[in-house]
Image: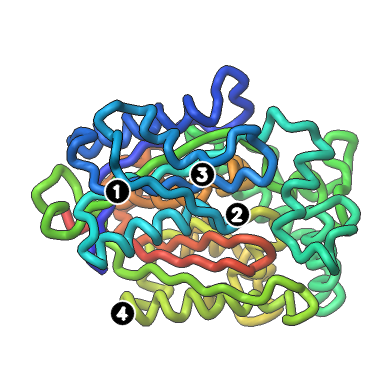
Amino acid sequence: MTACIVGWAHSAFGKLADETVESLITKVANEALEHAGIGPDDVDEIVLGHFNAGFSAQDFTASLVLQADDRLRFKPATRIENACATGSAAVRQGIRAIDANAAKIVLVVGVEQMTTTAGPEIGKNLLKASYLPEEGDTPAGFAGVFGGIAQAYFQRHGDQSDALATIAAKNHKNGVDNPYAQMRKDFGFDFCRHESEKNPFVAGPLKRTDCSLVSDGAAAIVLADTRTALRMKRAVAFRANEHVQDFLPLSKRDILLFEGAEEAWSRALKSAGVTLDDLSLVETHDCFTIAELIEYEAMGLAKRGEGGRIALEGQTEKSGRLPVNPSGGLKAKGHPIGATGVSMHALSAMQLTGEAGGIQVPNAKLAGIFNMGGAAVANYVSILERIK
C-alpha cells in the first residue's frame, strides 16, 4: 500500500438541526486540510462518500466539496456509494487513485444527514440496502432484517441476550469519553439487558439498546502517497485495505456466517503480514449488537457460535485482549451512513498517533477497521500503522 492518512477532521454526530449536508461537508473538508498542514491547491482528487437514498433532496453532491474553497474548482470530484460501507468505499477509491499514481494527495469526505427525514421514510430508505424482491416487506425495516438474524442465531447457538446486552453496555460506556459521540451515557448492563418503557423490543430479540442511532454528521481524511506523507506532520499507513462483495439476497448464503466479512479479514491480515493478536484495537460495524457478536467470529476472535462468550468474558472491553469499538461504535457514536467508514479511519488514526483523548487505547500500534454495507454484503477491512 502506498497511501497514508496525513490529516483528518470529525464533526459531532447526532441531531444537527443547524447543519446541512453542504455545511457539514465544507466544515470537515477545510478542517482536514488544515490538520494535514496543506491547502486546497495541494489536493489532486476529491472523493465523497454519501449514501443518501432519499435522505437529502440535493443529490449529485460530489461538487459540494468544492464549496469549501474556491481553489478546489476544477479538481476531479466523485461521489461513491456502497450502502452503510459508503465511507470506506470512498477511502478505498482514494487509495486506488494514489496506487495508480493518478494522485499524490486525495481529500476523502463522508457525510449523511438523516434526522430531518420522517421516521417511516428513514426505515424505507435504509431498507433499500436489502434485496427488495425478497426482503422489501420485512416488518421494522432493516432492524427487522437483523432481528431475524438474531433470532436465527439464538435458535442455532442458544439465547445470547446477556451477550448482546454486554456488547451494548460496553459500547455505551466507551462512548462517554468520545467528544464526537451522539449518545454519551453509560447505561450499564441491567438497563441494556431488560425490556422497559425506555428500552422496548424493536425487532425479534433486539431492543432499542441493540440498535445503532439515526444520525447526522461528517468526517474527512487526507490521503497522501508514502513519499509525500513522510515529509508531512504525521503519517498513518495502510498495511492493508481489502474489499469483498457478497450476494445481496439473504437466501443465497448462510447469513449467520458473515462469510464476506471473514474473507475480507483473512485477506487483510495476510496482506498486512500480521495476526489478529498483533492488533491493538478494532473499530467494527455494530449497526446492531448481533452484528458485532457475529463479527467476532468472522474476524477470528472466536469460533463459530462462541462470539457471545468472548463478550461475556470481557475480551473486547477497552482493557481486554482486543479492545473493540473504543469509540463507542455505531451504537453510541452514531451512524450517519456515508460518514461512518471515514469516521472509523479518522478515529483509528487518532489512536495510532496518540491523539484520541479519553478514548485512547494505551500504546496503540496497529488498528483494524471493519465497515460493512447491508447484511454483510459490502465488506471492507483496513489495517493501519503509524510510520511517522
* Tag 3: amino acid: Ala
* C-alpha span from label 4 to label 1: 30 Å
Q: How crowded is mark 3: few (under 14 residues within 10 Å), some or many (20 or more)?
A: many
- Sooner in the amino-acid sequence: mark 3 or mark 4: 4
Q: Mark 2 points at which residue?
A: 84
The residue at the far left in this view is 231
Q: Which residue is drawn at 71% across and 62% down?
A: 290
- Sooner in the amino-acid sequence: mark 3 or mark 1: 1
Q: Is residue 201 above or below residue 276?
A: above
Q: Name the residue under label 4.
A: 273
Front tag of 3 and 4: 3
Residue 79 lies left or right of residue 149; in this view the side is: left
| Residue 45: mark | 1
- Which of the 4 image quadrants contains residue 368? bottom left
Residue 272: x and y, percent?
A: 32, 75
Q: Residue at x 54, y 43 (%)?
A: 174
* C-alpha span from label 1 to label 2: 23 Å
| Residue 339: mark | 3
Circle count? 4
Q: Are marks 3 and 2 in contact (CB under 8 Å)?
A: no
Front tag of 3 and 1: 1
Residue 355: tell me if it is visible: yes
Front tag of 4 and 2: 2
* Tag 1: amino acid: Glu
Residue 183: tell me if it is visible: no
Give the structural element (helix, strand or loop) at label 4. loop
